[in-house]
Amino acid sequence: MNPTWTDTQLDQQARDRRVRTAVVVTVVGLLILAAAGVIAWSWRAELPDPVASHWGSHGTVNGFSSLGGLLATLLGIGGALVLGFGAMTGFLGQSAANRRIGAAAAIWAALWIATLLLGTLSVQRGLTDARDAGDVGNVLGIALAASLVPAILVGVFVPGDPHRPTERPVAADAPRVRLLGAERAVWLGRASSPIGFIIGVPVAVAIVVIAVTTGLWWLLAEVGVIVLLFIGLSSFVVRVDDQGLSIRSTVGWPRTRVPLDEVVRADVTTVSPVRDFGGWGWRTGRDGRVGIVLRKGEALLVQRTGDRSIVVTVDDAASAAGLLNALSDRQRQGR
Amino acid sequence: MLFRVDPTADEPIFAQLVGQVRLAVATGRVRAGERLPAARDLAESLDVNIHTVLKAYQELRDDGLIELRRGRGAVVADQSGRDHSALLAAVEAVVREARLLELTPQATAALVKEAFRQ
């Protein structure tokens, strides 16, 4: 961190960073889709006409489409998803967490559609009647793995936010708890929701049943991933202490931290999950707000340098906000 | 919930923690069934020994204020039949009178302790 840079220059650098990430993932995503379209079109002489486009629950074909129609539909959906997630990365990507989610989702959507398209067409090459196309259960498994693994890697490798301290004091009207000179203080709370278990456990059981009855054993690997994801995203430990704000999943990941020297101010707010964040879990909200939203109601809102903000739903948010502001005061005064 | 310790105070740190949990339960800021933070998290943030926190939790358990459950940690016990509102009102009155007389908190606490002996 070069202390001679002005706020305006730092803002410009942050904007460049997020536009660069958004453009790269959008272009790469569209190229993946275009390549899949070109490969699919090059197979047209070997494919039945019409091609199979939909399979029923027993693995038999129950939908047909012309090759051109199938390409237009799938590439259209894929392109819209890539552009949407790319735009989210660019427009709502002040915080690294949002850029990671947006970039990973864009690459996931492109690879998912591309592998689905090529996978379902490849089992039809050499057929004269699309009704003879076999089961595509394994194609789904491969498409899932081939899209999720690279997407996670993209999320990991998206450039993060550099440390951006401020020396400005916290606004005088922000709530504060009173701290004595030698006092050490911590606020510990939980953001948790039973929804993760209520949905995750039945879904996991259903997948195990499907895997056993259909013999699609790769589904079992998914059970592990889904259960971990639901548990990881349904309970967080929230902590305010002399290290700042930390939000950590009970299973250790995902997590995030706001150091004291990046706190602009902390407040109590009220969250409506669907209206403000479009759902529950680790979300991206309007104006690029990062949300750890496990229920409706009271929440801690922390505004952070670089036009970033984060919301986490906790009880007793007033104490959390008051302590974070008070500790930030202490940090600005160099104690 | 909010925890604070003052290492320069005369009161031992575990007793400061016990007092704060007791107060939070009495005032309803922490409700029955709620989980207190993991002792390790609390000790880490306050920069105190984990055994200090565990000692506080054990004392709270002995008082019936919390239950220590394996895997669930410290959970605030059912407080039914322990309505603190009248007591809190009385304490408020005591503080008001003490302020009028410009008594220190220590002197006021000594009076309360003395009253318990009778």
Image: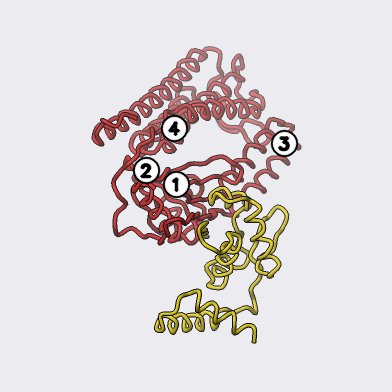
Q: Residue at x 68, y 30 (%)?
A: A218
SS label for mark 1: strand
SS label for mark 4: helix
For the residues labelled 2 and 4, the Cα–Cα distance comes to 40 Å
The colour with which the image depicts chain A is red
Give the mark nearer the N terminus: 1 vs 4: 4
Question: Can you identify the residue that label 4 sits on?
Answer: A77
Kindly identify which chain the residue marked by label 3 belongs to: A
Question: Can you identify the residue that label 3 sits on?
Answer: A211
Color encoding of the figure: by chain
Are labels 1 and 2 on one chain?
Answer: yes
Kindly identify which chain the residue marked by label 2 belongs to: A
Give the mark nearer the N terminus: 1 vs 2: 1
Q: Could you say where residue B85 lies in the image, as x and y percent from the top left?
A: 54, 80
For the residues labelled 1 and 4, say whether their Cβ atoms are less than 8 Å apart.
Answer: no
Q: Residues within 10 Å of mark 3 (few under 14, many from 20)?
A: some
Q: Amino acid at mark 3?
A: Ala
Q: Which is closer to the viewer, label 1 or label 4?
A: 1
Q: Residues within 10 Å of mark 1 (few under 14, many from 20)?
A: many
Q: Could you say where residue A143 lies in the image, as x and y percent from the top left?
A: 58, 27
Q: Residues within 10 Å of mark 2 (few under 14, many from 20)?
A: many
